[in-house]
Image (spheres, rainbow, N blue to C red):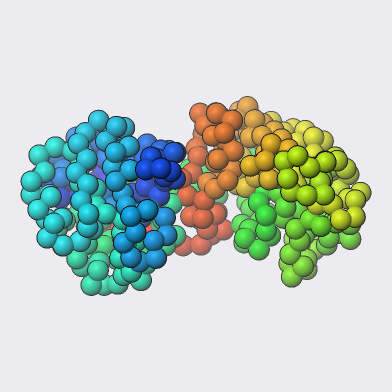
Amino acid sequence: MDKKSVRDLDVRDKRVLVRVDFNVPVKDGRVTDDTRINRALPTIRYLLDSGAKVALVSHLGRPGGMRNPDFEMDPVAGRLEDLLGEPIHKIDVAVGGEVDEALDSLESGVVLLENCRFYNDETKNDPGFSDNLAAPFDFFVNDAFGAAHRAHATTVGVASLLPSAAGLLMEKEIDYLESVLSNPERPFVAILGGAKVSDKLGVIESLLTTSDSLLVGGAMCFTFFKAKGYEVGASLVEDEYIEDAKRLMEEAGDKLSLPIDIVAAEKMEDGADTRTVKVDEMPSGWMGLDIGPETVELFAERASGAATIFWNGPMGVFEMDAFAKGTEGVARAVGESEATSVVGGGDSVAAVRKLGLDYEMSHISTGGGASLEYVEGKELPGVAVLPDKEDS
């Protein structure tokens, strides 16, 4: 990565604001998945070991620019304290004199600021709010790759005002994605799932350029099947993208592989009757809800021969056991392969964790939207604003 790193900063006895991505699921006042907190620990520990006074800021949920007790950072503070093994001094604001006071009195541990999206000016990247955020600090470190595709005050505004750098997680995310995009070991196999072609159109076009083989599953395959003239029953189809699907198939040729069998049902329910059918034999009125076993075998074979794999998106409605086997089969195949495997955030990460395959993957991204935009070739504002190493 060519951006300045937290390792390039002299932070001893300095105040450092760190943008983290602690947007984690919380239920009944407890964090139910602490992955994102865990992934931020190396940067926090590095700064503490380097003698810095550290404050962390993150969003949590979508409170709509106002204080909401359901989205306060207190459950995150409790879990972070358990994981870090250091005191967490959570305060009820993100800007103002209370931040200064907390830093002045800090003898050990870190300060956790309140949810930055309690402030309407955060998502507007308001200059005045950015000034107030930056005021108590000497340095800014962005370690929130999952929010890097947002031009907000805590990702872009503050970085424009303070000497800034990427955190260790941000570095790792970009290095892995860049290795996939710029110089992958070949064969490079990309696997895409999910519901809609519209969400992944740019990603498909990008991966058709960089990969040796692109495997497409999930509900979005039915837009391709309708473009082929197949009966798709009640399956999800984006009619306005049928021409795009035709174009992509024509341009890709043999590089693009679609499912060869489908698990279909009359209803999207766990107890529904299901049938495994060939993709051109969909029963009228039924809907395709997962890839079939022959497709899993085909995709697994491609994965086993890969040197690099990028995977984003489930192969079916994996939240329901009846339609989870395709996603599970692909996850196991990716985990068992000898390839450098990058899982691009989102639901595919949930599937990997559900199966306990986290440690079988080379890298699991913390940012679904950000990783897809990066793969698509879009500039991420939270990364672009960080200075390059030679500018330091």
Residue at 62% from the left image edge and 60% from the top image edge: 199
Residue 97 in view of the camera = yes
Q: In which quarter of the image is the C terminus?
A: bottom left
Q: Which of 149 and 374 is in front in this view?
A: 149
Q: Where residue 95 sits: x, y (%)?
A: 20, 61
Furthest-front residue in this view: 28
The quadrant holding residue 126 is: bottom left
Q: In this view, does 190 lie to the left or right of 285?
A: left
The quadrant holding residue 297 is: top right
Residue 326 in view of the camera = no
Q: Which of 106 and 13 is in front in this view?
A: 106
Q: In this view, does 149 lie to the left or right of 188?
A: left
Q: Is residue 88 left or right of residue 376?
A: left
Q: Where residue 112 sits: x, y (%)?
A: 24, 48
Residue at 67% from the left image edge and 41% from the top image edge: 320
The quadrant holding residue 277 is: top right
Q: Nearer the viewer, residue 118 or 350?
A: 118
Q: Where residue 21 sits: x, y (%)?
A: 37, 49
100 above or below 299?
below
Residue at 31% from the left image edge and 49% from the top image edge: 73
Q: Is residue 114 left or right of residue 178?
A: left
Residue at 77% from the left image edge and 67% from the top image edge: 239
Give the tally of numbered discs: 0
Q: Where residue 182 sits: x, y (%)?
A: 53, 49
Q: Nearer the viewer, residue 95 or 48?
A: 95
